[in-house]
Amino acid sequence: MSRYEINSLLYRLKKDPDFRARFLADANAALAGADLTDTERAAFVAHDMRKINELGGYLHLVMSIPGLAAH
């Protein structure tokens, strides 16, 4: 697992509205250079915040991303 990369992406999704918009429009393209496993990438593409949390995403970040937060 690449816990650091997961949380870096979560932080970027939270703080960078342009990146978040690109991610929402085309997650695969937005994640093109990310160092993720196939499972991690699939969770992001599916916007599966529960799975991202299970894979090491900090709950605070998972819960605080506008438009993606898992409530």
Image (cartoon, rainbow, N blue to C red):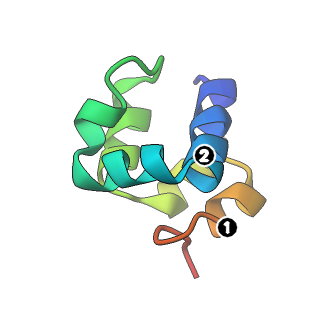
Q: Name the residue under label 2.
A: 10
Above or below 63: residue 57: above
Which x, y percent locates residue 9?
57, 37
Is 62 in front, or is 23?
Answer: 23
User: Would you call the spot at circle 1 few (<14 residues within 10 Å), some (14-19), or many (20 or more)?
Assistant: some
Query: What mark, if any, has residue 5 been given in the picture?
Result: none
**SS at circle 1:** loop
Above or below 13: residue 68: below
Horizontal relation, residue 8 to residue 46: left or right: right
Q: Mark 1 points at which residue?
A: 64
The amino acid type found where label 2 is placed reads: Leu
Most extreme residue toward the bottom is: 71
Separation (CA) of disc 2 from disc 1: 9 Å
Q: Quadrant of the C terminus?
A: bottom right
Horizontal relation, residue 70 to residue 11: left or right: left
The amino acid type found where label 1 is placed reads: Ser
User: Would you call the spot at circle 2 few (<14 residues within 10 Å), some (14-19), or many (20 or more)?
Assistant: many
Which x, y percent locates residue 29?
25, 32
Above or below 7: residue 70: below
Q: Quadrant of the N terminus?
A: top right
**SS at circle 2:** helix
- Residue 40 falls in which quadrant of the image? top left
Which x, y percent locates residue 53?
61, 53
Which x, y percent locates residue 62?
63, 60
Point out the tag, 2 or 1, that comes first from the N-terminus. Answer: 2
The residue at 67%/67% (across/down) is: 64
The residue at 32%/41% (across/down) is: 42
The residue at 48%/67% (across/down) is: 68
The residue at 37%/54% (across/down) is: 21
